[in-house]
Image: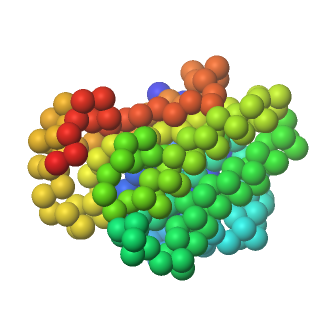
Amino acid sequence: MANQFESRVGIVTGAGEGIGREIARQLALRGAAVVLNDIDEAKAERVAAEIRDQGGRCAAAAGDVANVPFVRSMVDFTVAEFGGIDMIVANAGITHWCGFLEYEPQDFERLLAVNLGGSFFLAQAGAREMRRRGGGGRVLLMSSILGERAAPNVSAYSMTKAALRMLARNIAVELAPYQITVNAIAPGGTATPRTLTEEPDYEETWRRITPLQRAGTTTDIAEAALFLLSPEAAYITGQTLTVDGGWSVAGSIS
């Protein structure tokens, strides 16, 4: 397993902390060369250095995924740095908690630009390079259980996460002739630095309402991601894998 991704190259966005960081770290420790993106330059550089210190190959690419020219330049940087690209993990996203009746246009537009535009155009730029080079590839989008179950104050966020599920289905069909698979992951409640800061009782809440009686970990999500990126998942495309400890099946919302 240590060299499962040897000679493969990937981009992971929103990887300065949390789920993205762990996906990037696990890919690098299992042999991949990884370009690690975050909007926070200091954070991206620090985490990339930590991964290199652990023996992985990792370069930082700081920037805003809502900026399409930056996204395209990041793909070019990846090819120049590591010789190609085999995997895209469009993990970057923002959550904006706000009631539907109070939502402001500027917040709505920013949410769509990052969650949808950032994912769409990164997948496009990466797939163009995979098609040019031949040999297939993997695209992984980051949805959410809130893309399938309703909850208060996340109407716009949930809409974007539902859209990513459909994006995976549609572009899976278009990219199939090039042997590029496209899938999505829908994480459930996951303990990350952000969620634990925003809600100190986060882990206890999810322990109480989740059938497996615990919040998810970043490793839980990363392991699912690595499966879908691996050769073992070569015949899986257009799917969304829910990783939520059973919450979407039988959990409560409070």
Q: Is residue 252 left or right of residue 155?
A: left
Closer-to-camera residue (75/201): 201
Coordinates of residue 66 in the picture (x, y in percent): 63, 69
Q: Residue furthest right?
A: 132
Q: Decide: is 60 above or below 20.
A: below
Nearer to the camera, 186 or 191:
186
Measured as percent of width and height from the top left, residue 177 is found at 83, 28
Residue located at (33% from left, 43% from top): 188
Q: Is residue 53 visible?
A: no
- In this rendered view, identify the residue nearer to me: 133 or 252: 252
Q: x, y (%) of residue 162?
A: 51, 46
- Check the image and report above or below for 226 versus 200: above
| 137 sits to left or right of 143 | right
Residue drawn at (27%, 35%) of the image: 247
The residue lying toward the viewer, choosing from 183 and 217, is: 183
The residue drawn where x is 32% and y is 52% is 151
